[in-house]
């Protein structure tokens, strides 16, 4: 079968998209110009929501087995604990942050993709592309210098911050490069004052120091540094890292055996629209932002999860293009903007210089983190279970008397049932009491509805849940016709 979708870029985002499309029976090719995957840890954490979405594909267990669970985060200034945030309180089958170097994330995703029968094509570069109303024609250059002309139905750029696909579309990457300089060190540390299942953020008058456990004894250290105006970030020495840890940390931490040392600056940029015609962008090709909060890779992978089931339904001819694919940009651009704003705010709070402002920050932070609802909100945002699509064009009818979940809201996975979107078909799921009307609905839409019902959240309600686990409709029992009309609206009569 010729490829229906060409994916450019084989980082975590492109690999996730390729594996999801292949799982759903879409013919896909994925190309990557580099000769081998990264050997650097880079993006370090998989959050609860991403693991929930990986569980739909049946591969979350391999990631969990390979990673290191972090259960809490601490904010400290001097010898005072500003706040302790217990990540394990999140309502998810994965109540932790999973620390896993990006090199391992890519390896596991590539192995998962191979199990779907798709091989990654390395040393293959996209040179250019053009599109019509019916197809996209791409020019690829192979490792031996030969060129291939490939026609596909769709093209997705997952090719990073310097995206060839984004440039080819002429999309503006609006935003700024922050003038602060940063260092990153993956090192071994002795004397870390917290359990190796906890993160520590130190607010200091000089700036911020963040220490993440990667494995027992191995940590990532991130800190902002002051350099002369106009100077470029450079790789720090181990001695420089140790000096910053001594100055900003609690004392007693000893760094050794560096694995990766790097200097960087923070870019905050985003495209306005993630789609133009038959071409999409996802991940860093669409948005880049501060690493504060560790949301970047997860946001990109969730771009891929969002697009995959929609594109699969269109490729399988179960739905029309229509508002289904249009909703990808609408939903994910809004999330990208939220993540960019939140990460930028966290960065600004952590590196503020004014002494009076720092004093206020410390007092307010300690006060606010004393409230359980505040800590819960922080945990839900960190782990990304609070992500939703409240203003999505895919949201259907909603009866306000039923309460949560409302259309656009995440539906927490059930321990005793396969998550929505599992298996080899991207089907919606009905949360409803059995009835002849519900059964007729399933029979009317056999390619869109899972035949297995889930129990309704309330006895008098009926919920339709999307293949990515977000509510689409919430109506009273007996209003099956409203669900039927919704499904017809997204199929376009297919």
Image: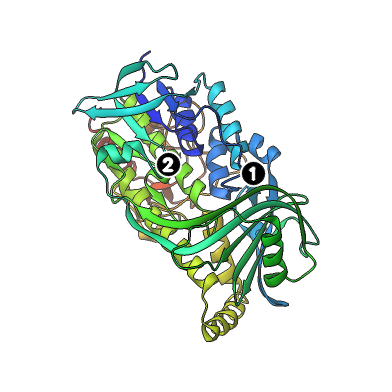
Q: Is residue 465 something one can see in this rendering?
A: no
Name the image quarter holding residue 277: top left
Judging depth in this view, the residue of 253 and 432 nearest the camera is 253
Q: Looking at the image, how many numbered discs can be counted on the residues?
A: 2
Give the residue furthest to the top: 1
Name the image quarter holding residue 425: top left
Report helix, strand or loop for mark 1.
loop
Q: Earlier in the sequence, mark 2 or mark 1?
A: 1
Instruction: Answer with left or right where residue 282 lies relative to residue 364.
Output: left
Report helix, strand or loop for mark 2.
loop
Front tag of 2 and 1: 2
Image position of 62 with respect to 240: above or below: above
Residue 452 location (% of width, % of height)? 50, 32
Identify the residue at horizontal 54%, vertical 48% (top origin). 49
Residue 23 location (% of width, % of height)? 48, 26
| Mark 1 crowdedness (10 Å alpha carbons): few <14, some 14-19, many ≥20 | many
Q: List the residue tagged with mark 1.
A: 100
Give the residue furthest to the left: 133
Identify the residue at horizontal 30%, vertical 24% (top origin). 138
Judging depth in this view, the residue of 261 and 481 nearest the camera is 261
Image position of 396 with respect to 105: above or below: below
Q: List the residue tagged with mark 2.
A: 160
Instruction: Answer with left or right where residue 231 lies relative to residue 488.
Output: right
Residue 185 location (% of width, % of height)? 65, 53
Image position of 344 with respect to 459: above or below: below
């Amino acid at each position: 079968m010729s490829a229906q979708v060409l994916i450019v870029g084989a980082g975590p985002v492109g690999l996730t998209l390729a594996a999801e499309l292949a799982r759903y029976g879409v013919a896909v090719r994925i190309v990557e110009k580099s000769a081998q995957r990264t050997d650097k840890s880079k993006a370090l954490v998989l959050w609860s929501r991403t693991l929930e979405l990986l569980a739909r594909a049946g591969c979350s267990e391999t990631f969990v087995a390979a990673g290191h669970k972090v259960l809490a985060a601490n904010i400290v200034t001097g010898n005072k604990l500003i706040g302790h945030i217990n990540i394990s309180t999140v309502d998810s089958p994965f109540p932790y942050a999973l620390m896993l170097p990006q090199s391992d994330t890519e390896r596991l995703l590539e192995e998962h993709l191979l199990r779907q029968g798709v091989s990654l094509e390395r040393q293959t570069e996209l040179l250019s592309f053009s599109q019509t109303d019916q197809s996209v024609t791409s020019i690829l250059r192979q490792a031996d210098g030969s060129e291939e002309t490939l026609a596909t139905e769709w093209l997705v750029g997952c090719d990073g911050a310097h995206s060839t696909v984004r440039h080819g579309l002429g999309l503006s990457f609006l935003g700024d490069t922050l003038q602060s300089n940063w260092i990153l060190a993956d090192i071994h540390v002795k004397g870390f004052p917290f359990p190796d299942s906890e993160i520590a953020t130190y607010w200091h008058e000089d700036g911020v120091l963040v220490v993440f456990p990667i494995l027992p004894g191995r940590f990532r250290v991130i800190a902002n540094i002051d350099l002369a105006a106009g100077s470029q970030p450079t790789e720090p020495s181990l001695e420089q890292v140790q000096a910053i840890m001594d100055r900003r940390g609690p004392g007693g931490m000893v760094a050794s055996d560096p694995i990766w040392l790097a200097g960087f600056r923070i870019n905050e940029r985003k495209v306005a629209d993630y789609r133009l015609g038959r071409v999409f962008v996802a991940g860093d090709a669409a948005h880049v932002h501060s690493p504060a909060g560790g949301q970047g890779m997860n946001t990109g992978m969730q771009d891929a999860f969002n697009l995959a089931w929609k594109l699969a339904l269109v490729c399988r001819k179960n739905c029309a293009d229509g508002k289904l694919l249009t909703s990808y940009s609408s939903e994910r651009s809004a999330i990208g903007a939220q993540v960019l704003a939140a990460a930028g705010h966290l960065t600004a709070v952590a590196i503020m210089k004014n002494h009076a402002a720092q004093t206020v920050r410390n007092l307010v932070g300690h006060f606010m983190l004393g409230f359980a609802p505040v800590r819960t909100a922080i945990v839900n945002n960190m782990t990304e279970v609070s992500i939703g699509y409240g203003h999505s064009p895919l949201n259907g009818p909603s009866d306000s008397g039923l309460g949560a979940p409302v259309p656009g809201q995440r539906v927490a996975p059930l321990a005793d049932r396969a998550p929505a979107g599992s298996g080899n078909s991207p089907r919606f799921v009905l949360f409803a009491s059995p009835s002849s009307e519900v059964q007729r609905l399933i029979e009317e839409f056999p390619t869109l509805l899972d035949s297995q019902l889930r129990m309704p959240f309330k006895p008098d309600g009926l919920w339709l849940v999307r293949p990515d686990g977000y509510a689409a409709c919430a109506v009273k029992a007996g209003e099956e016709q409203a669900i039927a009309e919704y499904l017809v609206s997204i199929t376009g009569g297919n």
